Amino acid sequence: MRVALFLTCVNDTLYPDTGRAVVKLLTRLGVEVDFPMAQTCCGQAHYNTGYRHEAEPLARHFSDVFGEYEAIVTPSGSCGAMVRELYPRMGERARAEGRGDTLAATLAPVVPKTYELTEFLVDVLGVTDVGAYYPHRVTYHPTCHGLRSLGLGDRPLKLLQAVKGLELVELPGADECCGFGGTFAVKNADVSAAMGADKVRNARSTGAEVLCAADNSCLMHIGGTMARLHTDMRPVHIAEILARTEEDSRS
Amino acid sequence: MSGTFVGMPAFPAFPVAAHEAVNNRTLRGNLRHATHTIRAKRAKAVAEVSDWAELREAGKQIKDHTLRHLDRYLVQLEESVTAAGGVVHWAADAEEANRIVVQLVQETGESEVVKVKSMATQEIGLNEALEAEGIRAYETDLAELIVQLGKDRPSHILVPAIHRNRGEIREIFAREMSEWGRPAPEGLTDTPAELAEAARLHLREKFLRAKVGVSGANFMVADTGTLVVVESEGNGRMCLTLPETLISVVGIEKIVPTWQDLEVFLQTLPRSSTAERMNPYTSTWTGTTDGDGPRVFHLVLLDNGRSDTLADEVGRQALRCIRCSACLNVCPVYERAGGHAYGSVYPGPIGAILSPQLRGTASEIDASLPYASSLCGACYEVCPVAIDIPEVLVHLRERVVEGGPVTREGNKVVLRPAKGHAAERAAMRAARWTFSHPGALRTGQRLASRTRRFHPRSLPGPGRAWSGTRELPAVPAEPFRDWWQRTHGGKDGAK
């Protein structure tokens, strides 16, 4: 099976390790991964800040770059939700504005074949044990768009539970937002920081070494808060845990 | 812009007001305790209902249907209420509604009224309007009483004194009750039973004396002209039955077509708001009945920005709201910012989409409310009428930054983009340009990577909003795409 990796602009620029982990993981599971070099950004930050019309060309560009692939896999719940939930809405809005069906038709092909990573693993590949080894105490934070927009449910937990050596501990208040929220983090910095501090406090109470999530933008906020509060915990993207094997640990 | 009045005027932007609340430890503690308690109770009460999803969908559809044919149902309601002996008045805005109520009270010759807890009368500032004409309005809901005695503002739809703890309530009662009537008992403690008893004694003399009652309504049934109030304390039942004259001020969106439609909302509302399977008191009245309850009944139908809201395809879903407060109780922003930061009698997520529609987005507070959310979606998940609050928030953000066509006071107008977003707009456009040119993106990424040793640990100016509380992420030695090209260069699938 040949899939396109939609890494997201944030991961491409700031978290290449996550991208390498996805490539390694999918390749190990027999998937041929392609990274279309023309990919940029899905337009989520524009859309959610109120610049829908600025987001439209980016959505069209996305469709242009990824339209030909069988499946599009992304290690981000919120960018996945942008495509799956909000691209159709953008099409509807354009129609309501009297601009016809062109945008809806352009975006329609990429919507059903875009998968968040854990969804792709569990639903498409049908695996929960990906052969990973990660000898650490880990707690999992379900990020909001993955949890509520995509309905990832217990897929990430099933994957983590099957990782050898990994001790999964429950995060109190797991389904409460970490406070990132894109531009919310700077537009309402006080509330955002307070939410982040509470999330870190809950994470710390688990005694875990690692806080894991399926979205690096949320982890950037949580990790930045952890560092500022001198918390002895690391934020790690779930792909980097699932990619790790016993061989890696030996080397 | 519209002069629609929702609560009290001239509030600072949301982040300014939230800043204070976030740093108030007592308030944070009170809100955290209260919202988490009711949040858990609601989840349990809802989980008991096997067809909750269907009830939610039914509630949504009943409301949507009614709103779509609101013109017809309003006329039907007027006919039914009139036939049952009531008098119907139409108020386009807060000022008109207040004028009507003041005049109706004056015609009775009375100088005081007892009130059932009502969001509509809070919205129009009725108590203040009555006060200005020498008429005293007594709030009789326990939490509203606490707010009124404390010369405070409500901070929650269902529990307006949620920001107060027992100790604070005891102090307010001990200090203020004598100003308004029967003083608090000597040696009042902060035990809930004693506080409730103090309120009971204080209020009872008002119930028995009052000749005029003022209420809102949770529902109005179009085909019978019946109004419905659901409550927990029984104060509403007193106000609705003891006075000679009853004046109800109700938003035009509160209609349901038939009695049968109530079967949905009387299940979803109590479980969503107080986490009760059924609320203790459900009062219904249809016009007037000889020898039973008020002899005179006036219904004031309030628009106050609702028709304008109804004209907006995306925003109109806010009118489905049944004021249950479930969205407030799950909102992580509300929990930390508190209700007062929303600058309206409608706080929390629903307030953030209702106030900027009812009042317009011209003021600082209203232009900032659509951003008072991380778009986490918890509000949508619990909403018993499935209002997609994040969708409306984003829609209103667009209205703020892009402007565009809206309806104000019944007229189509084209809004100009709000001031203060010029730098952001320029940044968004620049980002869009970069993202439309993969080569430019790559150049930027490489530049960031190569200069990474010189990157500051914290940012100046507006960047402090991030780095004041969070470390910046380190920029990697190379972006992913460079690694990919180095290692998988031959099969990059580039277009």
Image (tube, coloured by chain):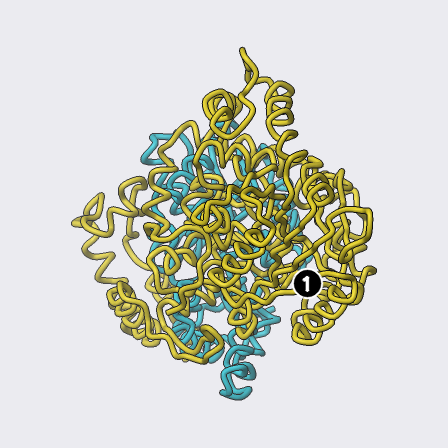
Chain colours: A cyan, B yellow
Q: Could you tell me which secondary element the residue under label 1 belongs to?
A: strand
The number of callouts visible is: 1
Which quadrant of the view contains residue B277?
top right
Q: Residue at x 50, y 51 (%)?
A: B126
Q: Residues within 10 Å of mark 1 (few under 14, many from 20)?
A: some
Of residues B40 and A85, the one drawn nearer to the viewer in this rendering: B40
At which x and y percent is residue A51?
39, 70
- Judged left or right of residue A196, residue A81 is right
Q: Residue at x 46, y 79 (%)?
A: B411
Q: Chain of mark 1?
A: B
**Residue A32 visible in the displayed image:** no
Of residues A27 and B105, the one drawn nearer to the viewer in this rendering: B105
Q: Residue at x 74, y 72 (%)?
A: B76
At which x and y percent is residue B113?
58, 43
- Judged left or right of residue B481, residue A133 is right
At which x and y percent is residue A105?
56, 84
Residue topped by disc 1: B87
**Residue B316 visible in the displayed image:** yes
